[in-house]
Amino acid sequence: MSQTPRPRWTKSLRNRALRLLIGGLLALPYRWRVPLCGWVMAYVVAPIAGYDRRVRDNLALVFPDMPQAEVRRLMRDVPRNVGRTLIEIYSGAEFVARATAQPLQGPGLAALDKANAEGRPVILVTGHIGNYDASRAALIARGYRVGALYRPMRDAQFNDHYVSAISQIGTPVFPRGRQGLGAMVRFLRSGGMLGILIDQSMRNGIPLDFMGHPAMTALSAAEMAVRYDALVIPTYGIRRANGFDFDVIIEAPIPHGSAEEMTQALNASLETLVRQNMDQWFWIHRRWK
């Protein structure tokens, strides 16, 4: 059965409540607002919005033997990280300062610097883990030309202020689909670096393995890399134990091959980080449909 669309007034009310929450939190010092938003998301929003059930169902699929105590912990810690990520993205320069507090690390740094010096396009692939904008913020702050491809939100009002927030971290940003395609391709062919999130279920993708189960995954990152001779580098912003700083990891480039092989390698890269940081991946997503 198809779901009944939510009335416009419901979306408007939800958007106003979110804007009020974000605005109130932004009035607080950074060290207070980040954990507070995490707490609100974990203990107020998640139970109401159904995130608890999504986390539990996804974990039951991937880890059916996980102890219930660990499931309950992740039902709180996963939305806590989501809340921290949300308010960090709205915090602009304060978030960028945290994202750049640690040096870049990883085996792909030399290849990234070489591509940048040569003006070769680079596609930076990440997932919803830690704070997915930390690596973009860190690279932009260090002088790299990094754009971002984003998936427009269904709620147009929320999408407007979300795009404004991610633009404070750096521009350009390109909406997925025809609207942003031309500008995105021109940016990439000019030697820019394009950040892409790979771990959302895509109707026009193909089923590839992720965490031991088929997940609809877009091939676009790999296809663009082959078409425009772009380097493909997985990048991640993993949250440190203090909850505020990040390890920005630049992995080795994915060798060019078929789009399916390259994308499966990207899935495998993300899976490794997810297994190492279970509470930092967005288990609230409907990744397996």
Image (cartoon, rainbow, N blue to C red):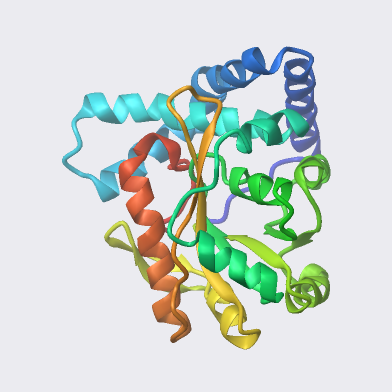
Q: Residue furthest left?
A: 65
Residue 81 horizontal/vertical position (percent): 50, 31
Q: Where, by quadrant of the figure, is residue 118 drawn? A: bottom right
Residue 11 horizontal/vertical position (percent): 75, 37
Q: Identify whether 107 is placed above or below 276.
A: below
Task: Give whichever of 48, 251 is nearer the camera.
Answer: 251
Residue 147 visible in this rendered orientation of the protein: yes
In the visual, does 22 lie left or right of 242? Answer: right
Q: Residue at x 53, y 71 (%)?
A: 232
Task: Give whichever of 222, 216 is nearer the camera.
Answer: 222
In the visual, does 257 lie left or right of 39? Answer: left
Task: Give whichever of 101, 83 is nearer the camera.
Answer: 101
Q: Residue at x 68, y 65 (%)?
A: 193
Residue 135 horizontal/vertical position (percent): 59, 48
Task: Give whichever of 250, 289 is nearer the camera.
Answer: 250
Q: Identify whether 95 is placed above or below 211.
A: above
How many discs appear? 0
Q: Identify whether 233 is placed above or below 134.
A: below
Residue 198 visible in this rendered orientation of the protein: no
Q: Residue at x 70, y 36 (%)?
A: 96
In the visual, does 129 lie left or right of 69? Answer: right
Quarter occupied by the C terminus: bottom left
Q: Residue at x 35, y 55 (%)?
A: 271
Residue 278 horizontal/vertical position (percent): 35, 39
